[in-house]
Each structure stands twice: as C-alpha cells, then as structure tokens.
Amino acid sequence: MNRLTQLLEAALFSAAHPLSVDDLRRVTDDASREDVRQALTVLGTHYDADGHAVELIEVAEGFQIVTRSAFAEAVAEAQIVRRPRKLSQAALETLAVVAYRQPVSRAEVEEIRGVSVESVLRSLLERGLLEVIGRGDGLGRPLLYGTTPLFLELLGLRSLDELPRLEELSVALRPPSERGEPTEP
C-alpha cells in the first residue's frame, strides 16, 4: 500500500462515523478526489483479498471500516461494543414517514400517523436521526424535518435513493396469502 492509502486507513480507523471523500482529502495536501477514490479501492481490495475480519464500505455518503458480518454476531455477543438503543415502534414509524416524505412538517407526520408525534420527533432530534431542514410556507411557517447522515449510517445506506420504493414495501407488507405465497398449516 502507498502512503495515501495508509493515511486514509488511519483516518477511517480513527473516525467514529463515515468520512466523505472531501473529509479524507484533508488528510493530505496534494490528493485529488480521484486519488482518494483510487486509494479507497486499493484499501477495500486489500481487505477483501487478504481475508481481513473488517471491510471498507460506502455508507451515509461516506466510507467506513466495519466488522464483516460473519464476525459481527460474535463481537456483539461478547458485549465489547456499545450498541445503540433500540427504537420504539412509534419512532420507527415516524422515521419512515420523514424518510419518504421529507421535507415534512410535524402536522403532516401527525396526519399520516393519526397520533401526536411531538415527543417522538424531539427524541429523534436528540438522537441525531432527524434534523430541522427549513421552514414551511404554511400558517406559522412550521419547522420541516429531514433525516441525517446518522440515519443513513444506522440503516447501512449510501443515500436515500437506496430506500425501498413504496411499491416494493406495499407488496412486502401484505399477508403471505395475498402475495400468492403458501401459508403454513
């Protein structure tokens, strides 16, 4: 590996979150975006070819070194890594609405969910999964919410474009009998 690849590996290893190509360019003075991308390819290939227990992934519009899935369960069971708190059903539903409808106001989320979401929104804001991304044009200029890079990171997505299409979800959420799949006796 060349020096740039080693520098990028050190930066990625030290980072607590995914780093963008622009973040990684700051490690050196003379690397272009293309140089960084090539070095990342070399690093990813190195991890894959030599059978490392870690891999380089592209997630949340950046890159991150993570444990390979084959080893993730053993590491989790050893409880040596702090796992994020689980989200409630209300939080998951609210996140889904915001992810698919952003930018979206509190009133719009409440209309879709049929319940008050003020405390759920506050919790998701505090956890860094949602952020205020502007103000609406309606009465009172309501706050508009959107997802954050941390949301993408937790779902393992590069961008929102990787979310399942709504048509795919409507089929997947139907009971097996309505999808034409056999049901168990």
Image: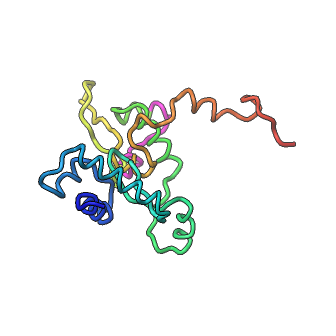
| Above or below, comparing residue 127 to residue 141 in the picture | below
Depth order, front residue of 114/144? 144
**The C terminus lies in which quarter of the figure?**
top right
Q: Position of residue 177 (x, y in %)?
A: 77, 32
- At horizontal 24% and vertical 43% (from top left) the residue drawn is 34
Depth order, front residue of 66/81? 66
Q: Position of residue 82 (x, y in %)?
A: 44, 69
Residue furthest to the top:
138
In this rendering, would 112 be left or right of 176?
A: left
Instruction: Tell me which corner region of the image, top left, top right, bottom left or bottom right, holds residue 5.
Output: bottom left
Q: Position of residue 112 (x, y in %)?
A: 48, 31
Residue 125 among magenta residues: no
- How many numbered dots are placed on residues in this image? 0
In this rendering, would 92 be left or right of 31?
A: right
Numbered range of the magenta stretch: 111-124
Residue furthest to the right:
185
Residue 113 among magenta residues: yes
Depth order, front residue of 103/51? 51
| Dominant secondary structure, magenta | helix
The colour scheme applied to this rendered structure is rainbow
**The N terminus lies in which quarter of the figure?**
bottom left
- At horizontal 18% and vertical 45% (from top left) the residue drawn is 32
Residue furthest to the left:
29
In this rendering, would 49 be left or right of 58?
A: right
Instruction: Tell me which corner region of the image, top left, top right, bottom left or bottom right, holds residue 137.
Output: top left
Q: Position of residue 170 (x, y in %)?
A: 60, 30
